[in-house]
Structures are given as structure tokens and as C-alpha cells.
Image: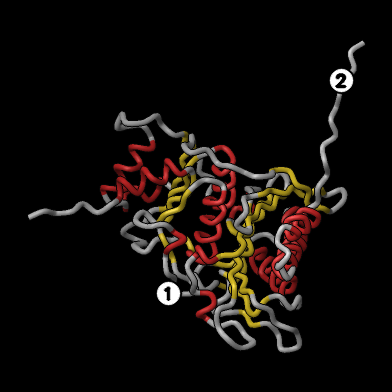
Amino acid sequence: MNVVNHTPVSVVTIERFIIEQERLYPEASGELSGILYDIALAAKMISNKVRMAGLVDIIGATENENVQGETQQKLDVLSNDIMIKAMDHGGRLCAMASEEEPDIIPIPDRFRTGKYCLMFDPLDGSSNIDVNVPVGTIFSVVRKITNGRAGELEDFLQPGRRQVAAGYIIYGSSTMMVYSTGQGVHGFTLDPSIGEFLLSHPNIRTPHKGKFLSVNDSYEQYWDEQVKALMRRYRGLDGVQQAHNVRYVGSLVADFHRNLLAGGVFVYPANSMSPRGKLRLLYEANPLAFICEQAGGAGSDGRIRILDVQPTELHQRTPLYLGSKGDVMTAIEMLMPVEVTA
């Protein structure tokens, strides 16, 4: 009788993993670890609300618009409140900024402040909730660079390369938190039976060349000719490379997550209707580009590296080419301005 040797797999909670990572840096104060704990807690609360969305009256739109001029979904508002309340009292942050709020969110005077700033999109893709499409939370952490107790605009308007942590939570068939503090990318899946995030995807690496293209083709009529040529290249229509499979959910976190694991490129070009692009630099592009680079991928606005863009506004928008490095380099090569010689 053959005996199958089942080697036990270590069960590592996100808390244990963060503690073990912190031990590698004796000078660490533990504040960044605390921020990640608090985000994980908020993620569990939001996940619970998302799972209950079809059973209670929290789906659908409110009568309000956010700073972007978009109609707020009920879960947007709820998720935003959860993030703020989970993060404002720990003494680790000096201020926050949310895609749903027009201005910096101060830390209440009754709480201590810390040396970090948090930026977040509380529920990306929330318009898809009503049709049960995966949605997500995106976050970015930078160090405070100004003096004084409270965070200031200057603290938030730092290029993405200065992020000390970034990540996202995807609420799909399972809830998963993926983050990086600059030492690789790691994914944790929520086990609802015990209420813990468990390490499920250590050291995520994205393929150099991907097989998926995520793009909203409804804007093709508004793209310039260089972008149209790039899309033909990705689709294999110009005979230069093998065609990508088009996969577009319309939820940035869902599209990005698939491409990160399987390889591919997410594309949201500028167009004649949105010449500055549509996606938010601080809340979406920077944190996901940070994750992507740490996993071996790349992020660009079509001209320069996303993480090198100097922000000038809290709600600045940007074009975005994000994913497998080889696919992003194709975009940069084809979108570079043509030099005119005399």
C-alpha cells in the first residue's frame, strides 16, 4: 500500500507575516505595520457589507455626487466611512485623502497624529455591485514631509516612487488583500470561517509579456492615431506580435488583479473627451503602479513612468498603461512623440 506523504503547508496570518517582515528591520517603529493591520480590519468590514449588498438596502445610487462629479453609490459612502473610522484614531496618520472627499481629511484633535499620510479609493468599481461584479479598495501610504501636527497638501503631492506601502483589496468570489512595502508583493485571502487573512500568494511575480488586454473599446472613436495603432498591435492585427485576448470587466481592481497574476496590460488612454486621462493618479495609478513594479511589471502614462509623475492636484487624473513590462514598453515605444527634422 502506497502512503502519500502530504507535507503540511504553514498557515501564516497577515499579522504574523507583517511581524516577521518587521523583524528584518530593527529600526522599524511598527507604525507602518499598524497601518496595514488597520486597513486589513477595514477590509473585513467592507467585505462583509459587500457580501450583504444583495440582501439589505445598500446597493444602488445616492442623490449625491463626489468630487469627480460622479453619482455616489451607497456602498461608496459606507466604505468611505469605514475606512476613515478604522484609520483616524491609531496615532499613525497625520491626515488622509479619499477619492470620495474634495479635501484632505484631518485627524480629529482628540487623537494623536503620526508621520504617515493615507490615500485611498474606498470602493473602486462600485457601480458594478448591482450586477455582482468584483469590486475593490485601493490604498497608498507616504511619509509626512512637512512640519507640524497635521498633514498638508504638500505631503500628499509626492511622486509615487516615494510610497512606502501600497495595495488593494479585491472583493470577489473570495476577498483578497495584496500589498507591498517595497520588498516584493504578497497576497492574503480572507478565511471567513475564522475571520483572518491568510498568506496565499507569496512573492507574486507577473509575466514579462502577458496574454490579456484590458481596455474600454467604446472610446476608440476618440483615440488619436497612435493609440489606435497600439491597440492594433496588441490585437495582433499588424502582424508584429501574437494577439492578446481582450478581457475587460470595467472594475479596475478586478482587471488589474487578473493581469497581475496571469500577465497582461490594462490600458486607459487619454482621448479627445478626456485629454488628461480619466483614472486618478494618487488613488489608483500610483498604488497599482507601485504594486506592479514590485512584481516585475511596469506602469506609464504613455510617456513617462507613472511613479515619476509629479502630482499638482489632489484629484489629478492620468492616462494609464499598466501591467506586464514588455507590454507597457510596447506602449511607450509606439506613443513616443515623433521628432520632426528640418
Coordinates of residue 322 in the picture (x, y in percent): 47, 50
From where the camera sits, is residue 55 visible? Answer: no
Front disc: 2 or 1: 2
Out of 89 and 183, give the one closest to the viewer: 183
Most extreme residue toward the front is 26
Q: Quadrant of the N terminus?
A: top right
Q: Residue 4 appears at what percent x and percent y?
A: 87, 20
Q: SS class of the residue under badge 2? A: loop
Instruction: Let me know if residue 295 appears in the view.
Output: yes
Report which residue position mark 2 lands on: 4
Residue 205: percent from left, percent from top: 58, 42
Determine whether 57 is above or below 176 in the image.
below
Query: Which one is earlier in the sequence, the residue at label 2 or at label 1?
Result: 2
Tell me how the rendering is colored.
Answer: secondary structure
Say left or right for 171 vs 48: left
What amino acid is labelled 1 in the image?
Answer: Thr
Q: Residue furthest top?
A: 1
Q: Residues within 10 Å of mark 1 (few under 14, many from 20)?
A: few
**Mark drawn on residue 312:** 1
Give the residue type at disc 2.
Answer: Val
Instruction: Please tell me which residue lies in front, 63 or 100.
Output: 100
Residue shown at the point (66%, 55%) measured from the top left: 169
Q: Residue furthest left?
A: 342
Looking at the rendering, in which quadrant would you find the C terminus?
Answer: bottom left
